[in-house]
Amino acid sequence: MSTLFDPAPFRARRARVLEHMQKNGGGVALVATAPERMRNRETAYAYRFDSYFHYLTGFAEPQATLVLIADNNNPRSILFCREKNAERETWEGFRFGPEAAAAQFAFDEAYACNELAERLPALIAGGQPLWCAFGHEDEASGFEALCAALIAVRRNGRAGWCAPATLHDIRHLLDEMRLIKDEAELALMRRAGAIARDAHIRAMRATRPGRYEFEIEAELLHAFRAAGATGPAYTSIVASGANACTLHYVANDRQMHAGELLLIDAGCELEGYASDITRTFPVSGRFSPAQRAIYELVLAMQHAAARATRPGASFDAPHEAAVDTLIDGLMDLKLLTGSRAEIVDTKRWQRFYMHRTGHWLGRDVHDVGAYRPHDAPRTLAAGMTLTIEPGCYIRAAADIDPAFHDIGIRIEDDALVTPDGCQLYTADTPKTVAEIETLMQSAQPTS
Ligand code: GLY
Ligand code: MN
Ligand code: MN
């Protein structure tokens, strides 16, 4: 963690949660971080905190729980975390311990995590509402069982305290808050986008016939870590030739050949925030006429989707604009024949474009936020962040002109909805045919 850590944005988010709780019956909120996970014998995965917990705390250690008390007279936030332990710190590294954590992260109180079970009954007593993320995929070990046990005590009726009668899923509130990014979040997302841009440029420069996909993946990893990102925000997709038509291809083990395209979908995680960029470019530096035609079409889809991304528009509008552009383009290229109405009706275009045009982006690369609150598409608003990532994937088939076989193209940028439209803040990653060909030509060995 940076020595310049500023607890203010995290404290402000906790204050907003407490205010919402106070307006809705008060009570106590419990937000646990993620458990540590074993990879294989005696070896753990690199630790990744829970996104909700970190959003409210900035605290990155495992075995921690945030408790928010929405008492009208004394609203406060309490952290339970690991104690200092000289021996464990020799093996695993620095721990704040409750006292230093309270000071650095601006909690009102902090205690050792092994005191949680003992202190919780008193904290949630009095029949106050309980706000939790029940059944959350990253639920910390034993946390939900602990709450269930506490609530069961009431049924037994002998504990002498009154357990919560009302349970709220705190994710309804936190998801809505996370959907609109604050200034601190946007600064990190822009930095994560710039690091991913530089990684894509490095990867383009390193690509040439005869190299393997994993060599290019290594360039991405180098660029992410060298710039201070934690690492990839998701497994990088480095897909050459026909592999680009496999949407979640991650084997990255094929040798690349002249005449093929390389699709790279890669982004980094920086202080808990993701970037997510896709670029597709020719391995040998020049697009074939068929590759270029599909590339220009996907670029036109992205422009259409970006024009449709603005406050007041439906979340579905960018996708609909991209699909309209795709149908026109594929009809012009004779890859779709028949009447437009019939193509729309039967959705035959889905043979070439089988995913949606974007998703929320934030702490999680597929970030939280209901896409259809109240069963209708979400209305976009300033401060939302999402990807705009149209594609076109043409597998080899007898009814397709061989010039188009195995062309898989996706172009993905990260967008902020602004008061009057949207800003693609990763768009300076080389994207036009001219930009890509110029960069690729300048990077080819001269001898
Ligand atoms: N990289 C994951 C996605 O584009 O959705
Ligand atoms: Mn994406
Ligand atoms: Mn992506």
Image (spheres, rainbow, N blue to C red):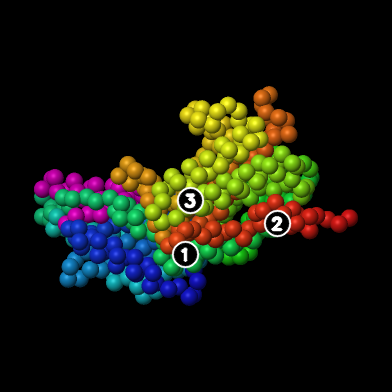
Q: Nearer the viewer, mark 3 or mark 2?
A: 3
* Mark found first going from the N terminus, 1 or 2: 1
- Asked whether residue 145 is drawn in magenta, I would say yes
Separation of disc 1 and disc 3 at Cα?
21 Å
Residue found at the far right of this picture:
447
The magenta segment is 128-157
Q: How many marks?
A: 3
* Callout 3: SS: loop
The residue type indicated by label 3 comes to: Ala
Q: Residue at x 61, y 65 (%)?
A: 227
Q: Is residue 416 visible?
A: yes
Q: Are marks 3 and 2 in contact (CB under 8 Å)?
A: no
* Residue depicted at x 34% and y 65%: 13
* Disc 1 residue type (three-letter): Leu
How crowded pointer 1 is (Cα within 10 Å; few <14, some 14-19, many 20+) is rated as some
Residue 62 in view: no
Instruction: Identify residue for label 1.
Output: 186
| 246 left or right of 115 in image | right
Cβ at disc 2 under 8 Å from ligand 3: no
Helix, strand or loop under label 2: helix
